[in-house]
Image (cartoon, rainbow, N blue to C red):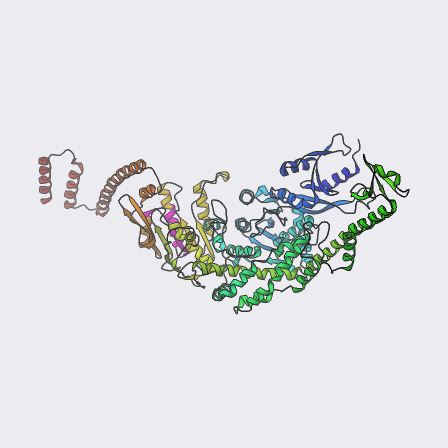
Amino acid sequence: MAITPMMQQYLDIKANYKDYLLFYRLGDFYELFYEDAKTGANELDLILTGKDCGGEERAPMCGMPHHSIENYINRLVEKGYKIAVCEQLEDPSEAKGIVKRDVVRVVTPGTVIESDFLNESQNNYLCGICIENNESGVAFIDITTGTINTTFFTGSEHLEKLYNELGVFSPSEVIMNLDKSKFPKIMKLLTEKLNTLINDNQDEKFDFETAKNNIETKFSDEFKIGSIENMPKILIRAVGAVLAYLYDTQKNELLNITEMNIYDKSLYMELDINTRRNLELTETMRTREKKGSLLYVIDKTKTSRGAKTLKQWLERPLLNCAVIHERQQAISELIEKNIEKSKIIQSLSKVYDTDKIVAKIVYKIAQVRDLKKISASVEVIPVIKQQLAFFGSGLLRKLDKNIDSLKDMREMIDEAIDDDMPANTKDGGYIRKGYSKEVDNLRSIVSDNKTLIDNIESREKESTGIRTLKIGYNKVFGYYIEVTKSNISQVPERYIRKQTLTNAERYVTTELKEMEETILEAHEKLIKLEEEIFEQVKQNISDNISRFQKTNRALADVDALCSLAETAEKYSYVCPEVDYSTALKIKEGRHPVVEQLTDDYYVPNDIDLDTDKNRLYIITGPNMAGKSTYMRQTAIITLLAQIGSFAPANEARIGIVDKIFTRVGASDDLAAGQSTFMTEMTEVAYILHNATKKSLIIYDEIGRGTSTFDGMSIARATLEYTANKKLGAKTLFATHYHELTELENEIDGVLNYNIAAKKRDDDIIFLRKIVRGAADDSYGIEVAKLAGVPNEVVRRAKEILSKLEENEQDRTAVKKRKKIEREILDSRDESISFDDIKKQEIYDKIKIIDINVLSPLEAFNILYELKKTSEK
């Protein structure tokens, strides 16, 4: 049995999109067939039906109305599916034979623009990765903002650096030239931690000449002939592949992609993925939620683009003091001129995500209401510029100049689009009255149809004498004249019978059909004309994309600066002194997150690190006393200072830190075959290989994942290597190995500090204050009691501890005796004197005495003999 032409068309198109769910347009519905239908019905809770397609069996099918397709697409993309949208390319009423159809858009996790699962305060990145030999190029793009961020890495650790960079951007989707199985660590990060869709083995998209041509075509103004030659080939291939993927999926010219930012990692502080996680910069370690993170505390932004900008600042601290000082000056002035700042913030709260709306226009999924959101956003821009005029700092003045009032865009939208548009705009009704005479005329015909019908009905009643005659309408027959059976004899010959009912007959007339055609034709023309005007307005916006994007970037920076000013003002932060010195000096520093989440008074602490006499703090003290909090707050204050923010302290001087490293407790990475100790050692190795004299290192309990002596040996060796002037990085080293505190007297620049605690009977009070010197006790059992360990266990622990301490004292005595023996033997000369022989004789006698069995008299006699021997 031959398959139908329509289904053959479907199968031909589907053959090119095997890995996609194909949404196939049929009239007012999009349909899924075969396996796609089963998947769609299961994932979307739709009814699975069937369709006769000429085959032996009915084809499984499910569908959804065309006007609600975005909701269904987004739900599937959220689940990791890729969608191909197949549209009708001609009017079915005018088509000869089967309607022409083709895929007009592809939606994937990295190219979705609007979805409930997208966080508006975070970028949704598509990423291209090109790896070859000893280098890797990477490109990230959020298609709503239209900026490609790209960089490259070389050398033996290029994959480790790529790994960290992927952790920063957290892409939703990746395309790569090679097989993903070759990079298990990176794939584990992408699939298990970031939930990233991976398209590997895409080598054809990374072809150098094709990639180069894509870049030159897209950025023809920015890249004059020859200038692209300065870009590394690995980087060109990564960027070009991303563009190729977008051309394939979006089926348009990508008009909103207007900027390529080739960023130099050396311009920003290096933060590896462990450091960002341990410091909980943007999400907590346990729940991976924003609440409880540093970003949660400082984010007071009002716009989605502003929130994205602040997050980017936090993840990429600066190394340039001039740029840092620019931001500091802007924040200082915003705090000083609080009234003007408050008005700016109030206006920013009325700004919609116009980046996304412009992207929706470019990718042809914008709705009429989106234009009114642009208008509402643009309306407040003059107010923002008016308030910015009060500020004189260099950065705020520059941002003000970059903000375009876009007055002409707003006027165009408001002139064309009615404020009181209907809830459902698919039947028109949204073009403002007076904008188009033709629209007004057609709308008059459509809206006056009731008057026309009433006039015809009145004339027919008069001419026929049938007073009960009435005119009605249905979708099957259109307009009709209905006459009851009792009046049929009065029906004139010009009436054409259309339908017979039980008690009536329905007729049409030439006049009625002509009127119907006029009304329907006017309605169709009206809808089409309104759509044309809508398209013209959208095209005008597309032609001015660069103006919108430049303005949005400037507004986002203003929003981020206002957020930092609000944070500083609300929580009493101070402006740190940031310079190129080696100092890291903080007075009364606080952990910005802990102080907000605790109900108790937060105890501030000082720190004074450098690369000379105060290179490394050995920090001891009981668990739960605050060692980790103290170390983390030092790193966070440093990081805040280098994004240009104020810091939670009474005073701070921060010499530029190039990298922050943290080695904080790890859980077993069993899936990767790594134990806690192996993970710990891998992280320590990475730090020691990559840290410089300008780095800040935090070690928290090095060596606890193995035996005591091994662990202490590794901890000491790590401490010595880090404190050595060859590295000499500013370091905080928390440990429970109290033996390491002896190094203060052995290594220059090493200082002992401890978190003060007060012991009262069996209880312990944490004073949370860091003081000079080593801790005098570990307080382990007291901490266990504080944590809620049952009293029976606590009592038994004390008994065991007492016995262990007695044994330790015995072992210590034996060690001292053996030391004396060694000293005596080592001090002997080759020629032994008579006195030496006598001393050895006395020593040997004492050695064999068992004092546990001696009576007082026997002891006296032995003492008498020893005295006589010594006198000889």
Q: Tell whether 756 sits left or right of 41.
A: left
Q: Residue at x 31, y 42 (%)?
A: 781
- On the picture, is 841 further left or further right than 468? left
Q: Is residue 229 visible?
A: no
> Per the image, is 718 magenta?
yes
Judging depth in this view, the residue of 795 and 323 nearest the camera is 795
In the depicted view, which residue is nearer to us: 779 or 358?
A: 358
Judge whether residue 701 can be spotted in this image: yes
Residue 180 placement, left or right of 760: right
> Which of 148 and 687 lies nearest the eye of the viewer?
148
Residue 37 appears in which quarter of the rendering? Answer: top right
Q: Position of residue 98 (x, y in %)?
A: 80, 42
Residue 364 in picture, x, y percent from top left: 69, 52
Q: Residue furthest right?
A: 493
Q: Which residues are magenta?
A: 714-738
Location of residue 717 in the rendering, given as x and y in whole percent from the top left corner: 38, 49
Residue 794 falls within the magenta-colored stretch:
no
Residue sticking out furthest to the top = 56
Q: Quadrant of the N terminus?
A: top right
The answer to whether residue 623 is above or below residue 749 is above
Q: Give the x, y percent position of residue 429.
A: 72, 53
- The residue at 58%/45% (across/down) is 196
Answer above or below: position of 194 versus 300: above
Count of marks, rendered view: 0
Q: Give residue 353's quadrant in the image.
A: bottom right
> Which quadrant is home to the C terminus?
top left
Residue 778 relative to residue 434: left or right: left
- Above or below, comparing residue 209 to residue 789 in the picture: below
